Structure formats: structure tokens, C-alpha cells
Image (tube, rainbow, N blue to C red):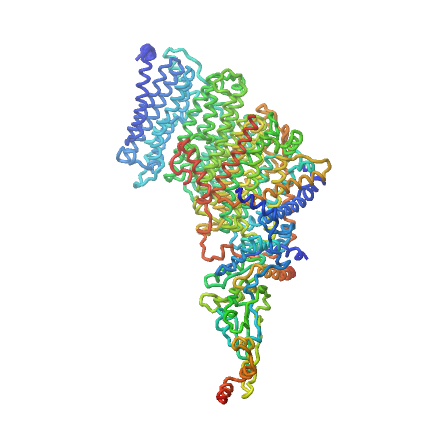
Amino acid sequence: MDTAALGEATAFIHGHTAEVLHIICTAIFIFCGIKALFHKELKKVLIYSLIGLVVDIRSLLTLDSSLALSAFYYHVFNFLVIVGMMLITARSLTKKAGSGKLYDMRGFGRAVPWTAAPLAAGLFAMMGLPPFSVFFSKYLMIAAFVDSGNIISSIVLAGGEVLYFLVFIRVIRVIFLDKYRGEPIEDRKPRELFPVYIFLAFITIGGLIPGIAVKPFVALADAMGSQVTDLPPMGLSWPIATLFLAAGSALVFFLGQKSNKRAGLLSSLLCLLAMPTLFFSDAGIYGISFAFLILFMGALQFFYSVSYMEHSHKQYRFYTFFLIMIAGLLGVSLSGDLLSMFFFWEIMSGWVMYLALAHEGDGFSIQEATKYFTFNYLGAAFLLAAVTVVYNETGHWNYTKIADNFQYTRPMAIAVLLLTLSFLMKAAQLPFRIDFQMHPKPAPTPISGYISSTVLKSGPFMMVKIFFLASGGVVATTLFPLESIMHVTGWIGALTIIIAASFAMLTNSMKRLLIFHTVSQLGYVVVGCSLMTSMGLAGGLLHFVNHMFFKNLLFLCAGAVFISTGTDKMDRLGGLARKMPITFFCFMIGVLSIAGVPLYSGFVSKWMIYHGVMESGFVGIAILALFGSVLTLASFIKFMHSAYLGQIQENVRDAKEASWYMLLPMSVLAGLSVLLGVFPGIALAPVNRILVEFSMQPLDITASSITFGADSIDMLFIVSILFMGMALAGLVYLLTQTKTRKTHVFVCGVGDLTCEDSHVSSVNFYEDAKGFIKGSVRIIKKIIGLKGDYIER
Amino acid sequence: MAGFFKIAIRNFLNGPTTDPYPFGETFTPEKYKGIIAYDPELCIGCSTCEYVCPSGAIKVTEKDDGTGVRFVFWLNTCSFCGNCGYYCPTDAVYNSNDFHTARHQSEKFIPTIDDDISYVRCKRCEQKIKAPVEALLIRAYDEITEEVRHQTSLCPDCRRQEQFERM
Amino acid sequence: MLSKYAIKSPWLYRINTGSCNGCDVELATTALIPRYDVERLGCKYTGSPKHADIVLVTGPITVRAEDYLIRMLDEIPEPRVIVAIGICPISGGIFRDSYSIRGPLDKYVEVDVNVSGCPIRPQSILDGVAQAIAIWKDKINQFHEA
Amino acid sequence: MITLSASSVFAYLLFPGGLFAILFGLILLSVERIAVARFQGRVGPPIYQNIFDILKLRIKEVLIPEDVTNRFMFAIAPVFGFVGMMTAIFILPVSGVYGGTGANSDLIVLVYLMALPAVSHILGGSASGSTFAAISVSREVILMFAYEISFIIVLFTVALEAGAGEGVVFSLKGIVDYQVIHGSFISNFKMIPAFLAFVIFMLATLEVPPFHIAENDGDVMKGYLMEYSGMPLAFFEITHALKLIVLLTVLQVFFMPGIAGYNVFFNLLWFIGKSAVVVIGIALIHASMPSFRVDQAFKFLMTVPILLSLMSLGMVLFL
């Protein structure tokens, strides 16, 4: 069909039947999605999803810009390549499994990895995840919509993809993550696999160097005769550190197959080696300091997981995915422009994290990892739409250029709102369903510790950047004024502190309690950062750093306990402090700093946040935040008492102290928590330079004191008074050198009490107050629609 | 709540009603059954008290050299029930209202009362008899004549003998 | 020595080894009712054996209470005074030769003051406590010489 | 850096800080015991009673439970509360007598320091491994969780009122100076509910009978102090006395710091007088109120003091 016919066909479609066509296409889109979701046959599933997605692109035709046309061509071409590749692999898998049924191919991904790998890659590509070209074609599609002005339909389109996302996830779970039970089958010969891998290579290259890959399609669109508007530049800026770590992860994948210890140490070394590369990056003090922290925590985490992953299987795969995730995170922090930030954001919270989280392979961890992956995908969809709108409004990707010509117009207001929304979703703030937004409990501790302390921080990290960018521009609309967005974010943060901490009061599993507390401590960071005053932001960023240390410390302690006792349930533990004194000591430092006791790091940042909040006059937020710290202390006391202190329980009798691989990172973090408590100046110096970068008035700080306007505090002074008191007490202890004698605990002389019934465990620790807390939690559950005993389990 | 406030304020105003015992005298009811007291003159050695004492605090035993009856009372097992005082025919044993029973451990095994009554020789046959007790005589006879005195100083056999001779 | 001041605050602790509660009621009255206020001597009933200075033991050590008593006596810090309240702990009292009691308190611990009576009078408890304080003073001195 | 001048060391160790506060606290505790006895019609202990309790505990033998879970935590727990209270007294200004430590005497620091005694009770109780202690630790945490809310709201109300509308005054000295000029808050009708809420908070923190739950002699006897004897127990008693002094000072800093005379001695007398009156008031409530059960206390503390303090917060904000 020659170009003229096509031209008027588009005009015709565009003419008066666009609405009818629109409705039909959407109907087909949804029908195919549902069909694919429940179909048994693998081939049928693939075909239905192809039809659905191609039909979904039909709305592109309604726009008559060349951008839409080239996007259409590029998108369709990509789809054809991917589905072709997947159909070939599907045929070979059906041949191997004997029948086309999806469930007969359970676990094939593990049995015949090399034949099945293209199928997985294709499925991830269809979802539009980064390293593949569909990511850019989908981005072009949404850019086309935004270009033609209707933002709402672009959001609907991005959101609609989630239906197909569920389809693909189901296939991946069945084929790749389930155990393989059949008799061993061997891979196909490399000669047959060659064509499939050419296709795979083609779409991956298309993803990595999008600029060149899209050229032929633009030419094709020009040939069609519609006027050429310039394509949005798609050049990615790869920071050196990310490249270094990506290469490192490949190295670990190949070298680490033999011994887990070597793989762990190698990846930890890689993180340390990546640090010097930060000096060459030009990402400004804010990005570099966050990157430095990422690498430092990564090194500790790997060193810890050398002995934690001892019992696990295929550690090299875990380390590779972990390293790629860190590379993505580095990309987010160091990237200079919004598009590459989004690209690395997708890598960080994309399929890499999904496979790392589902590493244990049992049903529960896969189900939780899928829930978290769906939640992240939804967040990323909003982000994609918002990022394109920002580009469309300002015409640039680079942060500094965006800041220069930033007008707060109506669409821009929607974009800022969407950005804040997706960053809040990343930082796991309420009021979204808390069981979805929290990263999964059964994931291995090193990665869940790392996600809690560092990966979730990318949310507030970017939120501050966006607030800074938005506050610079001239205000042109009254739709969503920036102050109200920030105020609402503050309130969301405060509510999260209270609700998440009260959930933590009820839960019985160690890691779930810690994850609830991550959510509530992030509430503090969000409250601090949403003020955008110099004291508030400095407090938020300092808490950002402190939380990183003491939260990771608590996670590592919980991991050490999990390894030596084998159970994650608090009510089956008791009296661990006898068997694991060093872990208990580090745990206590973590608890005291998360509760904000003056000698430890949590206190200083909370003090600054309260002063910042009260300075801006939000009394409600200050009260909720201060009460949140009491809730945190209460729930950690439950954890401390039922797991570490109290009577020693049976299954804890043979618990041994963790190996020094685990203890070293713990004591380093504990030392840092105390150091930052006494000398907050160390962390505040870079924070001050960040304040200057965000053109705010820096606080005048010395090594230990902070003064800003009227209120000031000198931590060393308070700590020296505390130490004087301790010295006094020690002196008095020495003076009264009376005899000491060991006797048994007083239980009215009864001799036959077993340990179980003389230990108050976490289930009935708050028995008396449970009525009240349960009532209020039930109301909250109704509001955010959480069913079952998710919290108590 | 208001009720208690009124009582508290009233107590405060009226001042304490504490009994100043260790530092001053305390009221002891007259009939309070405290430590028992023993009057050898009245005792006739019938050991009813030993028989009725529930906790075996009293021992009435023949003295080993046969010269009398030994009355031993050990405070630390007496339950102050007053049986002995009630059943003693001659009220030799009675409850005093002395309540100071706190003793040091070293004094624990010292008998509280260790008294004895000695026998009297019968006028005629020199046999040991218990001495006549004035209170009993008063209660037995209207008035104590010389005859009664004489009779009670004899041992039962001699008294029988004398009565027989008088017939 | 400091013992001159220390004896001003003897803390009492009650152990009931199967008593008929007659003496325990008397013990309670010495502390609580306004008439015989033991707090004037600086005494205070404590809840835990580990805070006890003067231990008031009531009841004839019945078979069931025996090993509880042994375990409890071990939990009382050293410069302490044991006071046997009522005739039961001193000699078994009325139940002396019954099959179910394990004899006087002396078999288990070295008693210092015996306050006999069934039940004892609150005033005699104050007597016992006063004597116990005197003994306690010497014990404190001995404890600190050793 | 650290300005450990002679005057601050003197203030910390002797006058408004250590020795004076401990002795004054112990005497006030004895005064409270005597007042309670007098309200019950008894004579009550001599006034030096609590001091001699400490001296007696000094000579006692220290018992360590053999299956204690963590000996280090068991020994260090009493020191937490003691240190917290000593620092709190040091930074609290006594009107007309002692000026506090300038910039560092801050409300937020005060909140966290006043939570330290409760933390030391909890650590001590759960480290001792005894069952009674575990039950009383869970009660203590529930109560602490309940009464902290009203304290925080009262705190912010006072800070806002002292800021007189345009800001918030976090420094304790600022609050005292504001009241000296504008008349103390006790006379200010807006602050009466906050005063009542603070008194309820005081009763709950000091474990005075309406809230004598964690160490209730009825069921958990000595509660978290069950396994302590000798010198560690003395530290807990001293911390209790210091906590009474800190609460009285905070009450006077928040609500009635009125400076009576000019020289230090007269102000000190005025301070002691006010404290004695408050202590006798507490003794009256102590003598005439039975104790709550834990869940009753929790419901009570979650409703009455919070409503009172919210009422006065509302009045301060919107009136």
C-alpha cells in the first residue's frame, strides 16, 4: 500500500471515526489482556499479548505528528522482533516439554537455561524495562502523546500496561522461578540457538544506544510525508562508577561460580574500588555524597553476606543482581539529566531487584517479591509520564537547564505532583497499601537491609531535587501550588511515622518489624525534606545519613540472629544476649539511636527536624513526629525483650555468636552511629555544602555543635555531662566494694518453672494495651484496605 | 473519691492515733491471755494442766530424787489457749496479760517456768504426800477447824486408819 | 562505722511457710493500720527477698513449703536477721508431731529472734523487730570485718 | 567547645545539681511518706528515712541472679536513669537561683532525658530475666507509651504560648523569662487544662498510686527492681528522688516560675516551699486513691490528659 493511501487512511481514521476506533481498540486491548492472563497455552499467551499491545498502539495513529508515526514504526518493529524470538524459543520449549501447556514447562528456566533465557529477556523487554529497546520506543510513544497535549491519556496508557505486566510476570514465575521436577533434559546445540541470540543482541543494542537505533524509523516517517518535528534527544550519560560496577558484576558472575567467599569478597572489593571514580564525576556534591554512601554501604553489605549466604545456593547470581542494582542506584544519584536518571531508576528497581529478592526460591518469597515488583512498576509508570511532561515543558533534560527555564504551568504542576507521588511510593510512604509498598520480608537479609537503608532513600533524594527545581520557576498556575504539595507531603510523612510504628507494635516477625520501622523513619526524612527550609532540610538529610547506618545495623543484627537460631519469629526466641553478646551490644546501640537517646546519632537529626518543623509552624506534624519516636522505642523494647533478654529459650541454647565476617560490619556501623551522635559535624559538613548548592543559608556548625538563628545545641557538651554522670556512678560503684553472690531468679521459690512459661514473649507483650491499638489499627486497615493478619504474622 | 478526701483531711487534722508502744506504754486488756503464771503454793501436782495442754507446753514430772513434783513450762510451744488456767482446780496456773514473748535465740531452750513443789511427810507413817493447799481447804470445808488441819496432814492410808480407829 | 546509720532503715520481708495466717494478719496490722505503725521504726515491707534485711518467717515448715523456703532463704542478701514469728516456726507449735511438718526453722537457717505466741500481738512483733535491729547492728559490723 | 568552668562543675556536682538535688529529693520523698501516713492517721517514718535507706543499701551484699541474661546490661541499667536525671537537673533553670546552661537547656533534650529513667527500668527489668520483672516491664512500656503523648502536647503548648504567637520558644530560659514578664502560666486561663494534664503526667511518671501499676505490691511486688539489691538498688532509689526533683522543677519552669524576692536565698526558699506544697498535694492523692489496672490506666491516660492538653493547645493556637 503506497504512501498516499496510508496518508489518507490516517487522515480518515483521524477524521470522525477516531472515537469509535478508540473504544474498539481499548475493548480489544482489555479482552486480549484478560485472555492472555488466564490462558494455559504458552504460545497462545504470547500471541494474545502481542495483539493486545499492538492494538494499544493504534491510538498513536490518531495523532498526526511525525514523532507519533516514527514512534509507531519503531514500537511495532521492536514488538515483531521480540515476539518472533519468543515464539522460536516457545516452539523449542514445547518440543522439549512435549505439550504446549504452560504448567508442563514448570522450572524449565532452571533446567535448560540457555534455551529459555531469550524467553525471559523477551518478556522483560515487552514490559518495557531498561536494557531493551522497547523502553525507548514506549518512551517515544508517551512523548508523542504528551507532545500533542493530552497528558491524561499518556498516564492511562502507561497505567494500562500493568495488565500485561501481570501476564508476563505469571509466565516468568512458572517457567523460571519454580523448581524443575522432571527428568534432566539437555540444552539445544549452540548452532540452533544462534539466530535467537542475534535477535536478543539486536534489541539489547537498541536499548543501549537508542539514538542510532531510531534513525531508520525517523527516515521511514519522513518518507511517509508528514512534517518532521525534532526527536527528543535520547543520549544516555553513563557515569563511570555505574560502568565500573556493571563490568564488575559480569566479572563476579563468571569468577564467583566456584566459591561463595571469593564472590562476596570480590564484590565488596569492587564497591571499594569504585569509590575513587567518584572524584571524576561532575554530578555535584549532593549526588557524589549519596553515591559515596551507596558504595560504602554496599561494601559492608557484601562483606556481611560472605558468611550470611554460606548456606544459600547460587550466591554468584545473587551477587551479580545485587551489583547491577547498586550500579543502577549509582546511576540515579550521579546522572546529570532526568532521562538517564529514569533509565537507571528502572534498572535499580526493575527485574534485577525482582530476581535478587526472589533468590530464596520458596513460594512465599516469590509471591512477596512479585507484589513489590508490581508496586515498583506502577510507580515507574507514573514517573515515565511525569518525566516526559517535564521535558516537554522545559525542552531540556539536563537539571541545570531545567532549573533555568522552569515555568510552573498547569501541566508542569501535574508533573511535579506525579513526580512527588512516585517518589513517595518509592519511599514506601502511606497511604498506599502497606503490604505492597514494603519490600518483602523473606528476601535474604543483606539485600533487604540494603534496600531499607539505601535504595529506598533514592525516593527522598530525588524528591528534594524536584522540590528544588520546582521552587526555582515562576508560578503560573494555582492548580497545585508547590507549598501545598510540600505541606501535604509533610503530613503524609507524619502519618506514616505514626501508622507504621503502631503496626510495628503488633507484628511478631523480626524483619517485618524492622521494615515497618524503615517506613516510619523514612517518614521523618520525608517530613524533614518537605520543609525545604535550611534547618528542616539539614535535619532531613542528616536523618537520611543516620538512618542509613543504624537501620542497616539493626538489619544485620536480625540477620545474624536468623542465621544462628534459624527462626525469624520473635516469640520463639528469648535470652539471646547470653549467647550472642556482641550482636546484642550492637543491637542495643542501634535501638538507642533509632529511639533518639541523646548520646546516639538518632537524637541530633530528630532534634533538627523538630526545630525545623516548629519553625515552619506545623505543630501537628511536630507532635506526631515526636510521638512517633515514643512508639518506635516501645516496639523496639518489645523486640529487645522477647528476642534478646528475658529467660533463655530451648531453641536458643545452641546459638553461637555470629562469625567475624558479620560482626565487623556491625561494629563499624555501631561505631559510626555513636560517632555521628557525638560529632554530628562530620556528616553536617557535606550537608552544609548541599544546602549551599540548593541556594539555602547553611547552618554554622562546629565538629559537635549546631547553631541556626535562636536555637542551638552542643552535643559534645551534653555528652560530656552524661559521661561525667557515668564517671560519678562508676566512682560510687568502686567505693562500695561489697561482696557479690550468685543466686537464682526469684520466682517465689518454685523450682519446676520451665523457660517457656516464665518468658514474656512478643505475642503477649502488649496484651493489656492490645484492645486499644488493635481497634485503631483496624480502622487504619479499613482506610488503606489491608486484609488478613498481614501485620501480626 | 471525694469521700476519701474528707477522711484524709480529717485524719490529717486530728493527728495520728498511733500507739507509742516501743517508746511508751501500751494498753493491754486486763483479761488478755498472755504468758501463763504459776503459783507453787496453790499447785497440788495433779498434772491436769499437762493433760489438757494441746501443744504439750507443760510437763509435770516427779523429781528424780523423789523430793517433790517439778512443773516445767516452755513458752515457745504454748498457744495461749488458756486450757490450763481453766481446768486447774486450784487456779495455780493462770494466764497473765504479759505479752513480751520476744526472746533471743540463745534463750530459746530455757524453760520459761521451771518450779517445783516439795512433798510433805505424813505425820504418822512418814510417807511422802502432797502438801495441803489452803485454797482447796477453804473451798472444801465451811470453816477450817483443827480437825481438818490434822486430817490433811496425814497420808490417805493413815487418814483411813485413823477414821477406822475413831469408829 | 556506717552501721550506726544503716540500722535506721530495716526492711521487713515476710515468708509464709504454710501458716494458718493468724500471725500474717498480725504482721499486716503492724504495718498498715494507724494504731501499730511499724514505719515509725523506719521499717518498710518489701516485695522481694533481695531487698530484705529482717526476714519474718511464719508457719510450721510444711512438707510442701520446705524446698520453697530453702530456695528463698538463699536469695536473701547477707547481713540479715531471721525472726521466727509465732510458735509454729519455733517448735512446730500445736502441730509439733504431725506427719506433714518438717520441724522447726532452726533446721534450715540460724534463727536470731523468736517471737512466740499464737497469734503474736502486734506489740510483740515490734519487740521482736527492735531486738532484731540490735542483732542486725552486730551482724553488719561482722559482715564488714569479714 | 566544652565550657567546663568551675561554676558549671559546681552547679553539676553540688548546688542545684547533684548533692543538693539528691538530698532534697530524698527528704521530699520522706516528706511525702510522712504526709501519706498522716493522711492515714499514722505517725509515718522520720524525715531522714529515705537517706538512711540509701546508706543501708550501700552496705548490703549485691546479689546477681545466676541465669541473668546479660550481666553487663544488668549492671549498667541503673546508671542510665541516674545519668539522665543528673543531666536533666543540670540543664533545668531554677528561676532566680540558677540559669540553666543557656543554649543547651532545650525542650527536646529535656523530653529525651526524662524518658531515660523509664528506659533504665526497662533495661534493668528485662535484663534480670525474672518473670515478675518481665510483666512489669511490659506494663511500664504501655504506661510510658500512654502518658508521653500528653506530655508532648503540653510541651508544645508551653513552647507556643511562650513564643506569644509569632514563633516558638524551645529554650527553657526563654520560657521562664516570658512568664516572669507576662505573669506565670498558672494564672493564665488558657493553660489551666495543660496544668491538669501535666499533673496527671507527673502522677503517672512517679508511679504514685492512681498509677502505682508497674511496681504494684499486689501482683508483681517490686516489679522491675525485683532482682536488684545493694548498691544498684540504691541507684534506682536515687534516680527516683532525682526524677521527683526534675518533675517539680519542670512543673515550676512550665507553670509557676514566679520570682519572689531578689537574693538567691529567698528564691530558693520560695522554690522549696512550692515544691513541698506540690509534694503534699501528691501525697493527698496518694493516700486517697486506689491504683488502676493496666488497661484501665491505659484507657484513662489515652483519653483524659490528651483531651485536656489538646484543649489548651487549641486555645493557645486559635485564641
* Residue at the farthest bottom position: B165
Q: How many marks?
A: 0
| C82 lies above or below D88 | below
Is D236 placed left or right of A492 in the picture?
right
Would residue B107 be visible to someone looking at this image? yes
- Image quadrant containing the C terminus of chain D: top right
Is A632 placed left or right of A47 in the picture?
right
Residue A623 % position (x, y): 53, 32
| A413 lies above or below A441 | above
Identified at 31% across, 21% down, the residue is A27
- Image quadrant containing the N terminus of chain D: top right
* Residue at the farthest right position: D263
Observer-nearest residue: A246 or A570?
A: A570
Residue A524 % position (x, y): 52, 32
Residue B96 % position (x, y): 57, 67
| C47 lies above or below B59 | above
| A35 lies above or below D227 | above
Observer-nearest residue: A12 or A412?
A: A412
Observer-nearest residue: A97 or B132?
A: B132
Observer-nearest residue: A351 or B40?
A: B40
Would residue D238 be visible to someone looking at this image? no
* Residue at the farthest left position: A99
Residue D290 % position (x, y): 52, 46
